[in-house]
Every structure is written in C-alpha cells, then in structure tokens.
Amino acid sequence: MAWDRHSTRLLAVDRYHPDRAAVCEAGAVLRGGGLVAFPTETVYGLGANALDAGAVERIFEAKGRPADNPLIVHLNTYEALERYFPGLPVAVPELARRFWPGPLTLVLEGGARFPPAVTGGLATVAVRIPSHPVALALITAAGVPVAAPSANLSGRPSPTTAAHVLDDLDGRIDLVLDGGPSGLGVESTVLDLSGDRPVILRPGGITLSELEAALGSVQLDSGVDGGPCPEKPRSPGMKYTHYAPRAPLIVFDGSDADRVSRCILLEAELLAAAGFQVGVMACDETASLYDGLGYTVIKAGRRADPATVAAVLYETLRRFDRLNVDTILAEGVPAVGMGLAVMNRLRRAAGGNVVPV
Ligand code: AMP
Ligand code: MG
C-alpha cells in the first residue's frame, strides 16, 4: 500500500484538562473506523475501535505488526469491564481497586464480542483501564472499547512523545493527540488470569512485589527475566525482537557497577580501534567514566532508581538512532522493581545480546 506521507493530523491537548473539541473529534475518528495515537501513562498508544475488525486490521497494517501478536483493549470504567467480561475471576476486584486506572493489563477469558483480529485468534483478551486523562477522555468520547498497541512501527522502540509517533507513523494514521511526554516510559505489566495461577507475561509499570502484595504468590513466565523464551510463549509478543534501535546493542549485565563499566570501557576501546563510532548508554552514577574518550555517551537515569531509567529508555534508544552510532554498549540495571521491566526491554532491544559480567 502507498502511504500518504504527512497526511496525519496533530492536535495538541492539555494533559490534565484535555480540550473537549479535540477529544470529541478524535472520538469521532475512532467511531468512523480510523486510527488515533494518544498518550497514556505508559507510552503512546495507537487506537482503533476494538469492536470493528476492519479498523483493528488497519492497526496491524500501519505498524507492520505480525497478525498473531494480539492487542490490549482499553476501557474507561469497571462497569464496561463487567459488561464485556461476564464472570470475572475473583482476583479482579482487588486488583482493580489497587491498580486501576493504571498500568496493569489483565489477560481474561471470555470477551467473545471482540473480533479475532484483536486477540490474534487466542481464546483470551488482554484488557486494561488506563489512568492518563487524555486516554480516558478519548475512550469516553469514542463510546467504544479502544484496542491499542504502542504507536510505533513494529520492532522499533515504543514512543513516549508525539514526535516519536510521527517519526514512525506519519502518513499511516489519521490523527495524533499530543498530550506531552507519556508517563512511566515502559508499557503496562501483562498479568495472565486465565489459568490456575496468576502469571506475569510481561513486566511493566506495576512491579512484581506490588502484585505479590495484592495476590500472594505470582509466577513469572519463562523468558520474562532472562531465561530462554519458549518457542510458543503465552504472550505472543514476547517472541518478536522489539524496541530495537538501528545500531546493534550489547547489554552488560552484572551486580557490580564498577565491573560493568570496566567491561564496557574494554569493549569500547576495541570497537573504536576498529573504526566504529561507539555509543554508551550509561547510568548517571557512572557516565563520567566514559568522558573524553571520543564515545557518544548518553546519561540514562540512575542505577539506584530504575524507574528513572525506564522513563528515558526509549527516548535514549531513539537518540542513538539520530546520532548515527555504529554500536551501542549499555549498562544493565538490577532487575528489581521497575528494573525488571527495564532489563526485559533492553534484552529484547539487544536481540538477546546480553553479556554477563
Ligand atoms: P503492545 O500493545 O505493543 O504493548 O503489546 C501488547 C502485549 O500484550 C503483547 O506482548 C501481546 O503479546 C500481549 N497480549 C495481548 N493480548 C494477549 C493475550 N490474549 N494473551 C497473552 N498476551 C497478550
Ligand atoms: Mg509494542
């Protein structure tokens, strides 16, 4: 298909008090079968009417997303959830009370009203109620459930600003609501409630310990924390390379920050001697160690607080694209709290190229 470059409209909206006219216009685009990108508290989403199979298929076309990678349905109220998913699992009310609206996605049985395009043919549906005022206003204005993956080209880093969305999708979608930078910087936690026990399929904005506090024990799906990804993972998205910058990325992972830096310095020296332009994704605490050596260094949050790394992770990967480096060497962070989501994304952005140090 030939895409009409620069036909995508951009409407600026206030993050906390989104302009009614703009949101109503975006809601009408969704009801008419169009595609609207919008800010959420995680990353920017690319929305379509989840009940309209044709509109949902347009998301896959615009993103170049594999058809077997299902979408998350976004609702605005708990009542809507009960309407679309009769017979909710017993854990849902408590999870909703603690974490909704917010960055937790539940995989549920039922949801028979959603077309197979949404679920990738699975018997389950992923659903969440986002907390971002623009996202909530948009779903309300649309008057329909909104299916929305991240608003990037498939495989690229997720977008955390409207400019990132346009970099990838200008001319491929109808409208972008620009509500400023999205919040957390990484996607929602995907929790599967369709089996005997709750399983985290993708770590994200709600941490493992927060879920354990609510549910008792929670399992991590294999592949989530660095183990080999099974051939047929329960979350189909996990088998695809994702979030990748253009240059190859190597992640150095270890509990000793000094050792991580020393290994990166050694590798950088070898690469630079071979004529490569080296990028270093460093934590704030260690960034100065790479100064004055000719490398392109980006400070990407504090090792001691992985939420600060999550907040700038995708922007950092996209900045390296703009800086034309040949190889990116990244410091890993401890995989606890938000660090679990950061390491999951870094590992996949690196195509598994993680060096234990
Ligand atoms: P994205 O919208 O790009 O954040 O991707 C949505 C994620 O949710 C992907 O990793 C999907 O594989 C996962 N997902 C969506 N629906 C389901 C489902 N029914 N079962 C398991 N994983 C799902
Ligand atoms: Mg995505």
Image: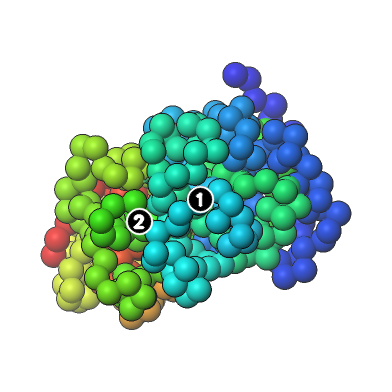
Q: Determine whether, in the image, residue 124 is placed left or right of residue 9.
A: left
Q: Identify the residue at horizontal 21%, vertical 64% (top origin).
A: 253
Q: Which residue is mark 2?
A: 193
Decide: few, some or many residues near mark 2? Use Cα within 10 Å; few <14, some 14-19, many ≥20. Answer: many
- Could one spot residue 321 in this view of the protein? no
N-terminal-most mark, 2 or 1 = 1
> On the image, which quarter does residue 265 sit in?
bottom left
Query: What's the CA distance linking mark 2 and mark 1?
Result: 13 Å
Front residue of this view, candidates 287 and 125: 125
What type is the residue that disc 1 sits on?
Phe
Q: Residue at x 63, y 40 (%)?
A: 48
Count of marks, rendered view? 2
As drawn, 270 above or below 147 = below
Q: Which residue position holds label 1? A: 85
Q: Nearer the viewer, residue 280 or 290?
A: 280
Q: CB under 8 Å between callouts 2 and 1? A: no
Q: Give how far across and how far down residue 217 sits, in percent.
A: 24, 70
On whether ligand 1 comes within 8 Å of the CB at mark 1, the answer is no
Task: Report the front residue among 162 and 263.
Answer: 162
> Callout 2: helix, strand or loop?
loop
- Where 271 sits versus 91, above or below? above
Instruction: Single out the residue that lies furthest toward the top.
Output: 1
- At 58% across and 62% down in the image, what residue appears? 78
Frontmost of labels 2 and 1 is 1
Residue 100 visible from this viewpoint: yes
The picture places residue 76, in percent across and down from the top left corner, at: 63, 58
Residue located at (33% from left, 78% from top): 213
In this view, the residue in front, 297 or 257, is 257
Residue 67, position as x, y percentages in the image: 44, 30
Q: Quadrant of the C terminus?
A: bottom left
- Name the residue type under label 2: Leu
Q: Residue 197 occupies which quadrant of the picture? A: bottom left
